[in-house]
Image: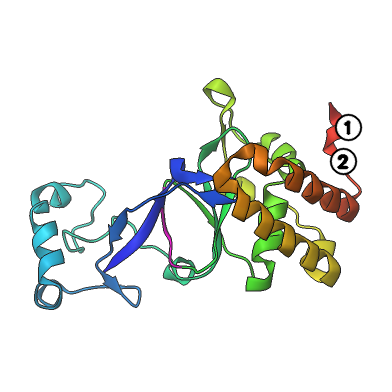
Amino acid sequence: LLHPVVSGPEIQRFTFSASDSYLLYPYEGGNVLREPEFRTKYPFAYKYLKQYEDILSARTSLRNDRFWFELSEKRDVRWLGKPKLLTRDLALRASFAPDVIGDMFLVGGTAVVPMGEQLLKPLLCYLNSRLVNWYLTQSTPMFRADFVKFEPQHISQLPVPRALIEDAENLSRLNALADLASSRAPLGEDYVVEIEDQIEEVIVEMTGIDVRKFG
């Protein structure tokens, strides 16, 4: 029942900060465990949560027909176990990181699940691009210290160039650049700048839009 979990602040551009946290998720196959089964099959996990039954039961968001250890709202499990891109809610600029294996659970952020796994890394490059950052900051809320709130309703409206999805050469180039950016990202932003410049050139070629000329 334990799943690796990343929270919003741990998500950086192209990578995650180191985390040893796990989420206790009392569900199997998308369905909550019945309490007798939970207690018998996973006694240590049940004992751990039982310590917090009073707090969990007191949640105003928990409906009367739910077990005390259930989520307040059901999750769509179809995306939880798939390769996906994760972003934090608040960031200074568009900051997406890849969950290549598809085993990462998310707290405090948004997930983008591509239609096919071959699009994961090209989309990673695109979503971290200056163009996407410029586009999203036109409609997303601004907060103190220039933080921007990247919400699903804005990300879902983002246009994606056909040249990114359908052009084999672009897919290959962006796949390679995404691997380079992700491998160097833990070393710091300075190590990724040159690679990001190369990514920007590909995005400009695909779209014909260079936001660096916007000032």
The label shown at residue 210 is: 2
Q: Outermost residue, top direction?
A: 145
- The quarter of the picture where the N terminus appears is bottom left
Which residue is depicted at the point 63% across and 72% down?
Answer: 117
- Residue 21: give x, y in percent of width and height: 32, 53
Which residue position holds label 1?
213
Viewer-closest of 155 and 210: 210
Element type at mark 2? loop
Can see residue 151? no
Residue 38 part of the magenta-drawn span: no
Badge 1 marks a residue whose secondary structure is helix
How crowded is the residue under tag 1: few (<14 C-alpha within 10 Å), some, or many (20+)?
Answer: few
Q: Which residues are magenta?
A: 103-107
Q: Residue at x 69, y 67 (%)?
A: 119
Task: Identify the image quadrant of residue 177.
Answer: bottom right
Q: Position of residue 70 (x, y in %)?
A: 23, 61
**Is the Cβ of the residue at disc 1 closer than 8 Å to that at disc 2?**
yes
Q: Amino acid at mark 2?
A: Asp
The span from disc 1 to disc 2 (Cα, nearest Å) is: 6 Å
Q: Position of residue 27 (x, y in %)?
A: 28, 70
Q: Horizontal placement of 107 versus 94: left or right? A: left
The amino acid beneath tag 1 is Lys
Question: Relative to 38, is 200 above or below?
Answer: above
